Amino acid sequence: MTLWAPRVIVSGIAVAGITAALLTGCTGRDALVTTSNASGHVLMSDARHVEAVPGETIDGTLTIVGSCFGFETGTGTFAAVFPNGSQLVENTDQVEIPGWGTLGLGNHYQGGGGVVASATLSYRDSIPAACRSDRIVVLDPIR
């Protein structure tokens, strides 16, 4: 019985440490994940959730802005942050967007998201320099 008690304490400490690490990751400022394809084009995605303005939609064409995937819209051309789980399709200039589908350069997107002030994003300092601007598209295709 005396051997079992210390194991429980150690296990409890380990669980508490893992829980703290997970919570720290959820509340950390930097939640931007960047990946690039063979062409050097960068996909930015939010590791936690999206921060788009609720109720807005994006209507635009997938393009490259600086070195990042973005959208040419009726109000301008902006780099974009894609939702959690978005990924580049290997050896292509296509982005797979969870819950929406696959989008290639020149393809039209109409769906949830918004153009937001970059300064309002918690991960603004992690946006690659070539893609930074005052405003950025944040997609939220699943509402």
Image: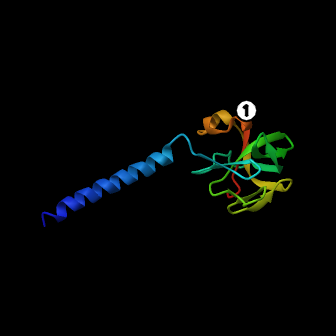
Foreground of the two, 52 or 101? 101
Q: In the rendered view, does 8 fall on the left or right side of 48?
A: left
SS at badge 1? loop
Looking at the rendered structure, the kind of residue marked 1 is: Asp
Depicted 24 relative to depicted 92: above or below: above
Give the residue drawn at x 29%, y 53%.
Answer: 13
For this orientation, the residue located farthest to the front is 38
Give the residue drawn at x 68%, y 58%.
Answer: 142
For this orientation, the residue located farthest to the left is 2
Foreground of the two, 92 or 71? 92
Image x and y of residue 134, in percent: 73, 32
Using the rendered view, name the quadrant where residue 135 is placed. top right
Image x and y of residue 85, in percent: 63, 58
Image x and y of residue 88, in percent: 71, 57
Q: In the rendered view, does 65 fall on the left or right side of 4?
A: right
- Which residue bears the numbered disc 1? 134
Using the rendered view, name the quadrant where residue 3 is placed. bottom left
Image x and y of residue 75, in percent: 84, 40
Q: How many marks?
A: 1
Give the residue drawn at x 18%, y 61%.
Answer: 5
Q: Is residue 109 visible?
A: yes
How crowded is the residue under tag 1: few (<14 C-alpha within 10 Å), some, or many (20+)?
A: few
Foreground of the two, 69 or 120? 69
Quadrant including the C terminus: bottom right
Colouring rule applied to residues: rainbow
Q: In the rendered view, does 59 fall on the left or right side of 26?
A: right
Quadrant including the N terminus: bottom left
Give the residue drawn at x 22%, y 61%.
Answer: 7
Q: Is residue 121 visible?
A: no
For this orientation, the residue located farthest to the bottom is 1
